[in-house]
Image (spheres, rainbow, N blue to C red):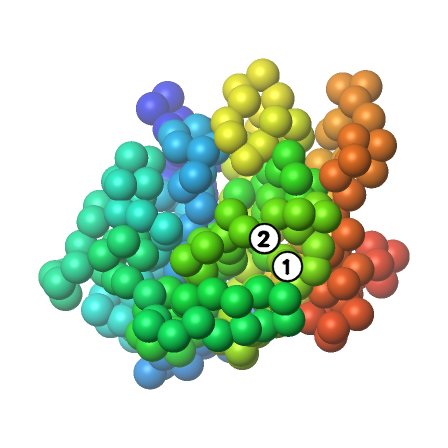
């Protein structure tokens, strides 16, 4: 998956296509994307660029998704690569674009803005990103496989904190029930079509910031339609890597991802690893 100066785009695209076709259980990537996305959808791709270069959603993974969407007729103007700020996107290599129809739209909440009225979901009260609330009809979540110093796991569901204006308010009690509350909002729950976790390079300790000494290279992506199940798998992978390095479990480190059980109890997905079908092809 890796080239001298970054990622091998062709190999990453094959990896993404293989993950999406395995998820839908078809052989043709275009057929897989058609099973997930309607041809008239406006697709918001939520990336994670918080940690900067070396621990953010990779441009290669997102480009592979864009090619998949284009293969089923989605126009560039109906694809929005989106994050908290435009500066974060640009810093990790995404090309900003507000108006051109010859490339995907790409900008942050600082340019796209938020709704004017606070709405509540469980214990969360926030202004929501205009991209997700009003532009997008479909959501693809592209987080990074990493740990988090408060929530334990900083992968898929935690990435949706980037859709609200006040995420810093919701980190008490290991982010429970707040991660579940954010993902239970209809803007997320009803629009989410795919989670594609970037695990080309992952991190087992020190997140959400980049700590190079705690990174490793699985060279993988993880695709799922169930956001709780995907994060449960992410937790398993992180715990296994921590164990290999002689580190305490997340629970022993006082940051268990309790919100996984809360999210499952609220019907957002399956958190019991023994009930999750994992295709490691």
Q: Is residue 121 above or below residue 252?
A: below
For residue 43, side relative to residue 98 (left or right): right
Q: Is residue 118 above or below residue 90?
A: below
Choose between 202 and 21: the one closer to the eye.
202
Mark 2 closeness class: few <14, some 14–19, many ≥20 residues within 10 Å: some
- Residue 19, position as x, y percentages in the image: 57, 55
Q: Name the residue rendered at 66%, 30% in the picture.
A: 204
For residue 230, side relative to residue 56 (left or right): right
Q: Name the residue rendered at 44%, 29% in the picture.
A: 54
In terms of secondary structure, where does tag 1 sit? Answer: helix
- Residue 205, position as x, y percentages in the image: 65, 27
Q: Which residue is mark 2?
A: 170
Quarter assignment of residue 88: top left
Q: Is residue 161 above or below residue 56?
A: below
Choose between 58 and 121: the one closer to the eye.
121
Mark with earlier residue (2, 1): 2
Q: Residue furthest top?
A: 213
Mark 2 in CB contact with mark 1 (< 8 angstroms): yes
For residue 100, side relative to residue 61 (left or right): left
- Residue 78, position as x, y percentages in the image: 27, 71
- Residue 280, position as x, y percentages in the image: 70, 49
Quarter assignment of residue 255: top right
Which mark, by number, is residue 134? none
In terms of secondary structure, where does tag 2 sit? Answer: loop
Residue 108 appears in the picture as rendered: yes
Choose between 217 and 90: the one closer to the eye.
90
Mark 1 closeness class: few <14, some 14–19, many ≥20 residues within 10 Å: many
Which mark, by number, is residue 178? 1
């Amino acid at each position: 998956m890796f080239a001298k100066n970054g990622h091998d785009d062709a190999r990453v695209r094959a990896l993404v296509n293989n993950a999406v076709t395995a998820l839908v259980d078809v052989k043709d990537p275009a057929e897989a994307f058609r099973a997930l996305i309607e041809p008239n959808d406006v697709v918001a791709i939520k990336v994670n660029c918080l940690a900067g270069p070396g621990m953010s959603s990779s441009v290669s993974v997102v480009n592979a998704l864009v090619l998949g969407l284009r293969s089923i007729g989605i126009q560039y103007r109906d694809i929005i690569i989106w994050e908290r700020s435009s500066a974060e996107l640009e810093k990790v290599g995404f090309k900003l674009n507000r108006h051109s129809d010859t490339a995907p739209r790409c900008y942050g909440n600082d340019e796209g803005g938020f709704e004017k009225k606070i709405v509540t979901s469980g214990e969360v009260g926030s202004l929501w990103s205009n991209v997700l609330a009003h532009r997008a009809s479909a959501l693809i979540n592209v987080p990074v496989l990493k740990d988090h110093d408060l929530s334990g796991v900083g992968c898929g569901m935690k990435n949706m904190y980037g859709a609200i204006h006040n995420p810093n308010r919701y980190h008490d009690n290991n982010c429970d029930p707040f991660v579940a509350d954010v993902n239970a909002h209809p803007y997320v729950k009803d629009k989410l079509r795919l989670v594609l976790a970037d695990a080309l390079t992952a991190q087992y300790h020190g997140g959400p910031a980049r700590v190079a000494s705690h990174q490793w290279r699985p060279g993988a992506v993880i695709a799922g339609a169930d956001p709780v199940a995907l994060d449960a798998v992410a937790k398993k992978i992180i715990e296994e890597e921590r164990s290999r390095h002689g580190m305490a479990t997340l629970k022993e480190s006082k940051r268990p991802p309790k919100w996984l059980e809360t999210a499952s109890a609220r019907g957002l997905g399956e958190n019991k690893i023994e009930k999750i079908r994992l295709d490691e092809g």
